[in-house]
Image (spheres, helix red, strand yellow):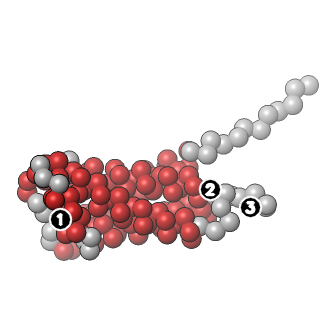
Amino acid sequence: MAEARRATPNRFVLPVFATVTYGALVIALFGFISLIANRDFIIEADAGPLLGPWMVAVACVATFVALVRAQGRAAPWPTALGSAASTYVLILVAGGIGYMVTKGQPIWALLFAARYAGSPFVIGAAALSAAVVIALWFVVPRSPQG
């Protein structure tokens, strides 16, 4: 009689779902902040309509990488902190590069990043990234060894 093979779960399935959830949470957060603060995420009129989604997409990629790395770890805190930091930096870098391409001068990358460094949108996206990493770590079962 053939022995039943136990299906091994794909290690990317839960991080993909958590990343999609993260993206939805960021969009909702941006909506609430925009409503409460009465301002847009990107206030430069010449930035174009794709700069904000590009920045959120880069944040989703950074969060996905952190979610994959957090699997099997003994504690989520270092990975969550790294996720928040990398999300924060990459959102600013992606926005700066995107705005620099629009303006055509490299100095605009630095000016854009400096302007948005204290933005509640960027800080909120970074904090949500850490929260999603911690939440997934608590949800995913771990082996008794790790």
User: Callout 2: 10 Å neighbours few (<14), some, many (20+)?
Assistant: many
> Residue 124 at what x, y percent from top left?
34, 69
Q: Earlier in the sequence, mark 2 or mark 3?
A: 2
What is the number of the mark on residue 71? 2
Give left or right: position of 52 versus 56. Answer: left
Q: Earlier in the sequence, mark 1 or mark 2?
A: 2
Residue drawn at x 48%, y 52% is: 64
- Residue 45: quadrant of the picture: bottom left
User: Callout 1: 10 Å neighbours few (<14), some, many (20+)?
Assistant: few
Element type at mark 2 = loop
Is residue 130 visible to us here? Answer: yes
Give the number of callouts. Answer: 3
Residue drawn at x 40%, y 53% is: 60
> Residue 115 at what x, y percent from top left?
19, 69
Residue topped by disc 3 = 146
User: Callout 3: 10 Å neighbours few (<14), some, many (20+)?
Assistant: few
Residue topped by disc 1 = 111
- From what the image shows, is residue 33 above or below residue 45? below
What is the number of the mark on residue 39? none
Name the image quarter holding the C terminus: bottom right
Residue drawn at x 16%, y 59% is: 107
Name the image quarter holding the N terminus: top right
Give the amino acid at mark 2.
Answer: Gln
Q: Earlier in the sequence, mark 1 or mark 3?
A: 1
> Residue 134 at what x, y percent from top left?
54, 66
